[in-house]
């Protein structure tokens, strides 16, 4: 069993904003794919996640093409990718909807990765973040860039997730390497 899949009471939430998408006039919104930069950044996000060892048990992803493609391009860089499911409700979600989705997870899960859209992922990350290094918190308050990855930890059960309950453990964005 990997270190993050132990019986520890700490839970990990990894929030990923999908990569840079083609312009809005290029396709219907749910069908917008990633640009070359978005594809490159998604691979870099996968490499960073693998190197950082922030393991999770499950990935949940918006059904929008740009979100699915981001996750699919991260997978080859992960030595132990978690099972994933795609949910349309994550495409239409706001921060409160994403929080509700996280609260539904089984108590046995120690970590969840969520690939979604702004402003919802940014709203969720800033709402949950109650502690963490000042520099990272300031950076998160400023922006959640495309293909950015925010890692939060909590000690409460999923069903008790609430604003301010999480610790900002890590934050990566393309160009940080």
Image (tube, grey):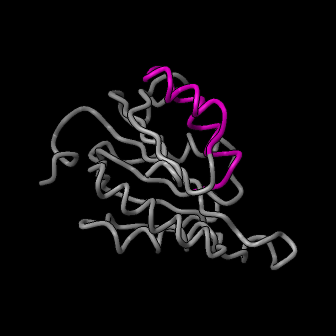
Front-lying residue, 146 or 92: 146
The residue sitting at the left extreme is 1
How many marks on residues?
Answer: 0
Image side of residue 118 versus residue 103, left or right: right
Write the start and end of the magenta stretch as one range. Answer: 116-144
Within the image, what quadrant is residue 100 found in?
top right
Residue found at x 37% / y 55%: 48
Residue 166 placement (x, y as % from top left): 44, 28
Residue 34 placement (x, y as % from top left): 64, 73
Front-lying residue, 121 or 77: 77
Residue found at x 19% / y 35%: 8
Principal SS element in the magenta part? helix
Image side of residue 30 versus residue 80, left or right: right
Within the image, what quadrant is residue 121 found in?
top right
Residue 44 placement (x, y as % from top left): 44, 63
Is 159 located above or below residue 88 in the figure?
above
Residue found at x 66% / y 64%: 20
Magenta run includes residue 98? no
Is 105 located above or below residue 96 in the figure?
below
Q: Quadrant of the N terminus?
A: bottom left
Front-lying residue, 26 or 173: 173
Front-lying residue, 174 or 55: 174
Residue 7 placement (x, y as % from top left): 16, 40
């Amino acid at each position: 069993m990997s270190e993050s899949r132990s019986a520890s009471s700490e839970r990990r939430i990894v929030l990923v904003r999908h990569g840079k998408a083609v312009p809005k006039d290029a396709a219907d919104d749910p069908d917008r794919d990633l640009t070359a930069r978005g594809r490159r950044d998604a691979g870099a996000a996968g490499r960073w996640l693998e190197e950082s060892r922030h393991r999770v048990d499950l990935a949940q992803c918006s059904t929008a093409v740009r979100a699915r493609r981001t996750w699919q391009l991260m997978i080859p860089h992960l030595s132990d990718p978690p099972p994933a499911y795609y949910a349309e409700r994550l495409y239409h979600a706001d921060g409160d909807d994403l929080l509700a989705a996280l609260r539904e997870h089984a108590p046995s899960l120690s970590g969840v990765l969520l690939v979604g859209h702004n402003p919802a992922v940014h709203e969720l990350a800033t709402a949950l973040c109650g502690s963490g290094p000042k520099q990272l918190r300031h950076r998160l308050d400023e922006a959640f860039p495309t293909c950015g990855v925010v890692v939060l930890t909590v000690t409460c059960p999923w069903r008790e997730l609430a604003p301010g309950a999480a610790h900002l453990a890590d934050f990566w964005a393309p160009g940080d390497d």
